[in-house]
Image (tube, rainbow, N blue to C red):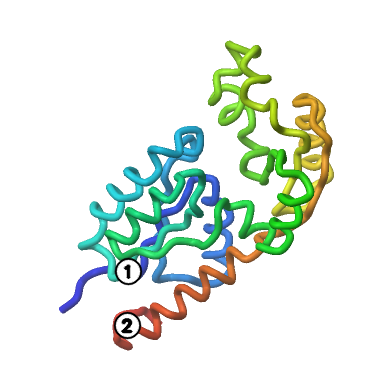
Amino acid sequence: MDTRRGTLIIACGALAHEISALQRASGWNALTVQCLPPELHNRPERIAPAVRAQIRQNRERYRTIFVAYADCGTGGLLDAVLREESVERLPGAHCYEFFAGPRLFAELAEAEPGTFYLTDFLLRHFERLVIRGLGLDEHPELHQQYFRHYRRLVYLAQTRSEQAQQEASRIAQRMGLAFEYRFTGYGELGERLQALLSRQRAAQPENAWPA
């Protein structure tokens, strides 16, 4: 008898809130989410090894594993690991792409390559992940080094909040960047996760999934 559980999603911690909300709304009872620290985005060379370790730690416990990361600055290293482990990931270069959708993201990137993107998660944790995470609290002189090629900040909002929009605008002003607001909701994240689960449900024996 196969005692393994359904599907494990190994997710970037920056997507934890959105994936959990989609899970509750959609009734994905056979889905387990494990999140890696969002601070890995400051050291993208560590993402692929961390994902591999999580896959190998859980392979015998779950029938299927899926990775809720885009490439996220790994330069193809994550894809190399996932090919070796035979695991899928979300398509795209960054999570911004599946929030905005490929077409809008391409338009934004083409209009201004030097764009700093905020999501709801990054807005909530800006001080921890950006200011302290990059050492700007102790070495503010590094700001020019990190952001010298940026010209614009785009806030890709998952929820509608005037307060959050104002806070994002203040961050743009603080960074000396032009500000643009785009409400995206969860973009294509829910659709892509639903498609994954539907494919995997179809591929599994009928008694492998709870009713």
The local crowd at label 1, few if under 14, some if 14 to 19, many if 20 or more residues have their Cα within 10 Å, is: many
Label placed on residue 204: 2
Label placed on residue 146: none
Discs 1, 2 touching: Cβ within 8 Å: yes
As drawn, is 25 to the left or to the right of 32?
right
Label whose residue precedes the other's in the sequence (1 or 2)? 1
Where is residue 43? Give x, y as percent.
45, 34
Where is residue 98? Give x, y as percent.
61, 60
Disc 2, SS = loop
Where is residue 101? Give x, y as percent.
67, 62
Per the model, the C-alpha gap separating discs 1 and 2 is 10 Å
When the figure is inspected, residue 118 is found, relative to residue 185, above or below; the finding is above
When the figure is inspected, residue 88 is found, relative to residue 125, above or below; the finding is below
* Residue lying at 49% horizontally and 45% vertically, measured from the top left: 13
Q: Type of residue at label 1?
A: Thr
> Residue furthest toward the bottom?
206
* Residue lying at 79% horizontally and 52% vertically, measured from the top left: 182
Image quadrant holding the C terminus, namely bottom left
* Residue lying at 53% horizontally and 26% vertically, measured from the top left: 133
Query: Who is closer to the viewer here, 111 or 15?
Result: 111
* Residue lying at 51% horizontally and 68% vertically, measured from the top left: 193
Image quadrant holding the N terminus, namely bottom left
Q: How many numbered discs sit on the rendered protein?
A: 2
The local crowd at label 2, few if under 14, some if 14 to 19, many if 20 or more residues have their Cα within 10 Å, is: few
Disc 1, SS = strand
Q: Type of residue at label 2?
A: Gln
Which image quadrant for residue 134? top right
When the figure is inspected, residue 148 is found, relative to residue 64, above or below; the finding is above
Label placed on residue 64: 1
